[in-house]
Image (cartoon, rainbow, N blue to C red):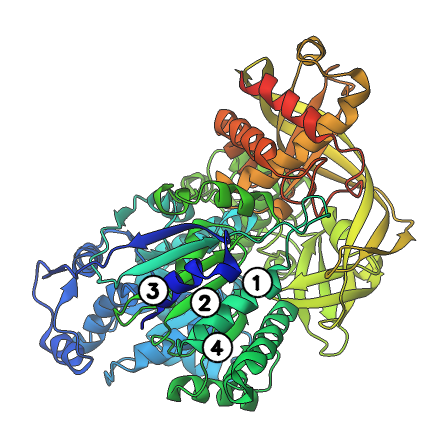
Amino acid sequence: MDACTTLDAIADDPRFFGRVVHLEVLPARAARTATTADPLAPGIVERLASRKVDALFTHQAQAIDLLRSGRHAVVATGTASGKSLCYQIPIVEHAIAADRSTALMLFPTKALAQDQLRSVRSWLVPGLKAVTYDGDTPDADRVWARKNANVVLTNPEMLHVGILPSHQRWATFFMRLQYVVIDELHSLRGVFGSHVAHLLRRLRRVCEHYGSSPTFCFASATIGNPAELAAALCGLDVTLVDDDGSPRGERHLAVWQRPVIEGVDGTRASANVECATILGEFVAAGHQTLAFTRSRKGAELVAQHAKRELAETHGPELADRVASYRAGYLPKERRAIEQRLADGSLLGIAATNALELGIDIGGLDAIVLNGFPGTLASMWQQMGRAGRSGERSAAVLVAGDDQLDQWYAAHPDQLVTRAAERAVINPDNPFVMRAQVSCATHELPLSPGDDRYFGEGLDDVVADLVRDDLAKPRGGKLYWAGREAPSTRVGLRTGTSHEYRLVDLEAGETVGTVDEARVHSVAHPGAMYLHQGRQYRVERLVESDRVALVAPADDADEYTQARSDTDIAIVAIDDEARVGAATVHIGAVEVTTQVVGYQRKSIATGRVLENVTLDLEPRSLTTRACWYTVPLPALLHAGLEPVQLLGTVHAAEHGLIGLLPLFTICDRWDVGGVSMAAHPQTGEPTIFVYDGYPGGAGIAEMAFAARDRHAAATLELIERCECDDGCPSCVQSPKCGNWNEYLDKAGACTLLRVVTV
């Protein structure tokens, strides 16, 4: 009995009656192959044959032809479709031909770079000298890499602070640069993607200085706009390769809705327990299964529950074949788990969804997702872990409490038929542009022609730098005049150079950064901070050093919600449009927020453990927003009572923010919201949805573009929710600055009907 048959049996089991709300059968797909326009080099053919590859898939042949001809390409195909060969083959061909060309490969994490290094070196080409170059590379190895390597694998941060600022040391490498590979394109969104867009322009500018013009190859999971995003990142025309010719076995996808607990309004059964039960059912049937969870603690809990249930029903022997696998384990522990997985003695694994396993998991039969992972791209990536050998596989999505989870639970067919979300960046963000142009000026003097790299906003940035004595004009060019290299003060993950580091007190390492405008909300003293599946508690916030000192708190059964007072002022209106009786606007705003306290709440029960008062200074954020103004007469005519106004706009705001990721690759933590019964500048009930980063990341623009569909989807979600007065699946928010007080679910429905009429 294969995993699909087991899934069918689980769906029919009376114990789980009504849990499976949708079962989709994705048919098997045969491979489609093609040949390249010019034959592959004999050395390539021989090496492919040794890997049991006797033909290229159609998308591989197309991509190789494009790169060989010097045309920039983005390969957007499924998990395990062989994207790496698309760029490895052209690079290896040059190494075999001994033409001395070089290649630069960018990966978002060190782990991915190490995996790709092993893959590149496995070609066993004598002239191929591939190395990783990152923060862990010893000084002696760095010197060797600069002088000898012809393939360098690194990450955007290292290119930003460790390579481009000292490009003179890399002169020979840049002079011969033939290919630039950017993997995981879909992760380059928002402020991070906006920084990387300028980083790639800086790279092109340095290459031009040394006489090279490299060909760019992007690799991406399926997203809504891969060619558009790739072109925006590098500033060049990019050809899309998305006709996936790789084979795929039949896959059954089930959407699992947790039952509502009787007597508790809108509350559903524990997602961890449900996920563990499904994992145990697959393990009991003998299928190797991976359950993705959202945190390290979640991984531990799912594994523990699954082991306990298996021990009770099948004995300790089977329970011992389940384990959690996460970062933080000792290398010896991880290797032992990997070996058990490889030899088949381990059947069930619970892991964080941020974890790169770094091991061959092609033998997996089933995947269980503990909540929708945020985007369709992520969902298909995770589900693609199973069935990679072409066998039938199963996947189960356990819907969480978030609005997005519940929307897909109500529209499960959209998981398969809906176009993938679009990723957005905003290279024109003035905070990002100023920081990146500073770095470019330090690397090479700016000249009048550099506006082709940095756009029309360059003149304003230049004027600012000169006024601040950071740059000096001389001989028709602009030279850096600052005392130090600016790159060390410019983080790629925030919209401004004023960022706070979160430092692990035990390890002494930086575990993350947060923008100055948001630090009080997410890293105030006492806050629980989640990073790559690991939970930390903020012990101290040292504002003078822009450092938050954190301690690991993986075992703490709690999360925190900040309480804040927020004002928002409209700075400029760029456009507006009618939606029903409302008007939707897009423009610039200034948000002033003061965090005044926080709640400690139990993860398991949601119970408030403690209310804590804070005394922190207000923070201001200049950003982009999309906002709805709804005439009061229209609301009163629709039956809304004046006393309902505050709770109505507040609940509608939460619903709109919760469903925004349906239309763009973002999550609720990338955006903020403010709602008022009567905004001072509009004089009407107003709901703001704003970018959570200085200058904006392009998310507000997407909200404005999707206004009709966004409002309609939010109305439907709230109306269909089974709760009486509002719950986390409709109008409550885990980041609400007012602790989800004053929410009127019925009023929100009335307002949204007025908007969508």
Q: Nearer the viewer, mark 4 or mark 3?
A: 3
Q: Position of residue 87 (x, y in %)?
A: 27, 64
Q: Which residue is mark 1?
A: 274
SS for tag 3?
helix
Q: CA distance from mark 1 to mark 4?
A: 15 Å
Q: CA distance from mark 4 to mark 3?
A: 16 Å
Q: Which residue is mark 3?
A: 4
Q: Amino acid at mark 2?
A: Gln
Q: Position of residue 35 (x, y in %)?
A: 9, 61
Asked whether the beta carbons under mark 2 and mark 4 sit within 8 Å of each other, the answer is no
Q: CA distance from mark 2 to mark 4?
A: 51 Å
SS for tag 2?
helix
Q: Amino acid at mark 4?
A: Gly
Q: Which residue is mark 2?
A: 168
Q: Is residue 168 left or right of residue 692?
A: left
Q: Which mark, by number, is residue 348?
A: 4
Inspect this view and state whether residue 473 appears.
no
